[in-house]
Image (spheres, grey):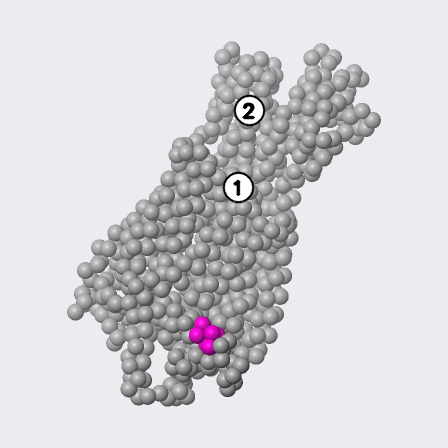
Amino acid sequence: MSKKVCGTNYPLSICFIVVNEFCERFSYYGMKALLTLYFLTYLHWDKDLSTAVYHAFSGLCYFTPILGAIIADSWLGKYKTIIYLSIVYVIGHVVKSVGAIPTVGNTDVHIALSMVGLILIAFGTGGIKPCVAAFGGDQFDEEHTSERQKFFSIFYMSINAGSLMSTVITPILRSDVQCFGGDCYALAFGVPAALMIVALVVFIAGSSLYKRSPPEGNILLEVCGCIGFAIRNRLQRAKYDTPRKHWLDWAEEKYSKRLIQEIKMVLRVLVLYIPLPMFWALFDQQGSRWTIQAARMNMAFGNSFSIKPDQMQMLNALLILVFVPIFDLIIYPLVRFCRINITPLRKMAAGMIFAALAFGAATLVEVNVVKTVVDPAPEGSYLMQVYNLAGGNVTVRTPGSNLFPEQIPPLQDPPEYVTLPVVGSSQEQMMEVTLNGNTSECQYTVEQQKAYSLILYSDAATVHCKLVEDFILKNQTGDPYLRFYNTLPESISLTVGDVKFTVPSGHMSPNQTVNRGEYRDVSCSIRSKACSNLNLGLLDFGGSYTVILMEDSGNIVMYKMEDVRANNVHIAWQIPQYALITMGEVLFSITGLEFSYSQAPANMKSVLQGGWLLTVAFGNVIVLIVAEGAGLEQWKEFLLFACLLLGVCIIFSIMAHFYKYVDPDQLDKVYMVDSSKEEDDDHDDKKQNKSNDIHLVKAGQGTRL
């Protein structure tokens, strides 16, 4: 007799399972939320490679559950599978966290440790995915069906709570805690690792309370065996044997008619799965392309609060909790009241349309986001802007043409970069600068596809030039860049927030990342005179600023130039696309699981779960291919995905139109077998059903399980 919770029919063991699931989901989603920015800012990969590796990892996480289910059902059982693969999971987290410590080896070591860690995590999280929920259901007695269903709801809430909290907390640990001179990825990955250790310890702590079912064989392997035998048998005997109505009937020599008929029913559903990966190709970009987009938006809500770009993913977990009851209690009853026949397959098609609309919204946002981006110089050219510190209006021209048609006022913030040609990979460039009617010549070396600032300063009647290379790419985390140019006769030290700058006389400091904010009291120090605190004003998200330090009447003054415009599209404009994609998830994912389970025998549910998870895996493969192969501008890529999903939706709708719904409960009435064998089969089915009924816990969990 298992111990119960406070006199109820709930086994005490489920408390350990629910806590384990919360901690595991926290560790997984907390780690995954950081991945894209980790690849971009720590490993310094470009956005396409970062996206490709992110989706390769996500895809692997949905291929490995098939392996985990086979190990649990055919070899170790659920309990040991969870224990052993959780250990693999923990090792993966630890390796991943060590790879995020800058002092451990070089970049190659960091990449190697990160990839090994992610592979181990994928096998760990994927391997236990089909086991934990089913193991929780095994703890209940057969007569406690209602308690089991309530457990599923609690289990589902623990999943959403873990994912929601982690996507809020770990980006804060990454950004707000500084270690090793930058964002603290080691801590941000280390906390999910610690939570996974807690998950494992909690699960082991309940070992004495668990009901453990021995391995009963994996139905997926039996299905694959039946299909393989039918194909081989047909190829070998089709020429001289009697034709059969269905190609699976060639397996009748070895497998029962009941099993064959069940597989036929499953295959009818699996055929409908063929177009489904395209939905997941769009859905899973929330953690990759949409996060990259968020980093190029204005993330401030007022003066005191701002959101992190990798925190926006929490909207999906939050909105799913809001939309599920709205759809169940309001929208679906209203549709039925209007006598509109909306079948499950029509709901799924509508979900695809909502996901396509989400990417349409993302396209509109992206078109406006890129307006503040400085496009890199094309091959055979370079970019240049001019800082006029000469004290009067100047005219800048190259021999034979005016570079700037109008005079440049002193201390003007350059409006934009000018694109100039360059012959070969580099060349000597001659520039004529006119000040007060006197023309001076400047000569410098430029390289193609680079950006420069030309600093003009005067010495009596002569204008001198200084060329400095610019970094025009926006910060991948969304924070502003800042640098100082010192025209003073001696070095100066400044502190902006927590960032220190030391700028020798006549030099430009390197770009450094500072936090977004108002800096009205910047401390500075210089040897020869007092240096009062300086006012930088607002350094906004995505901006790249150069501050010119000059002396005026014995005082130090500063002039702020905005080299790259700050992000001017607010991150709140991402909310519509998150709302649309979440509505699509409710219509597509939840309905799809309910439909699938209603169209196949109970003991085939694990087969459908395997097929469903594979659609998610292949959806991530699609993103991987497009990200690395298409080479499109981001808004065009978003538009491509939206159009592809609409095309797939049309194909799916045609397939759905010809689909005939079946009642799996009628299978026994159609196919009667030997009564003694039927009793054995029924007994096996009941044992299998108890496990397989809960492989997905509840047909409402989408991919968050």
Disc assigned to residue 570: none
Residue labelled with disc 1: 45
Is 656 located above or below residue 451 in the figure?
A: below
Residue at 60%, 14% (x, y): give it: 553
**Residue 518 at x, y = what percent?**
51, 33
**Residue 567 at x, y = what percent?**
58, 42
Judged from this view, the residue extending furthest toward the left is 1
Alpha carbon separation for disc pair 1 and 2: 25 Å
Residue at 41%, 72% (x, y): give it: 225
Residue labelled with disc 2: 509
Q: Which is nearer the eye, 103 or 250?
A: 250
- What is the magenta range? 227-233
In the shown orientation, is residue 242 left or right of residue 170? right
Judged from this view, the residue extending furthest toward the right is 400
Residue at 45%, 67% (x, y): give it: 611
Q: Does the magenta stretch include residue 102?
A: no
Q: In which quarter of the image is residue 115?
A: top left
Is 314 located above or below residue 323 in the figure?
A: above
Q: Which is nearer the eye, 69 or 300?
A: 69
Callout 1 amino acid: Trp
Instruction: State which tag comes first along the sequence, 1 or 2.
Output: 1
Density class for disc 1 (Cα within 10 Å; few <14, some 14-19, many ≥20) is some
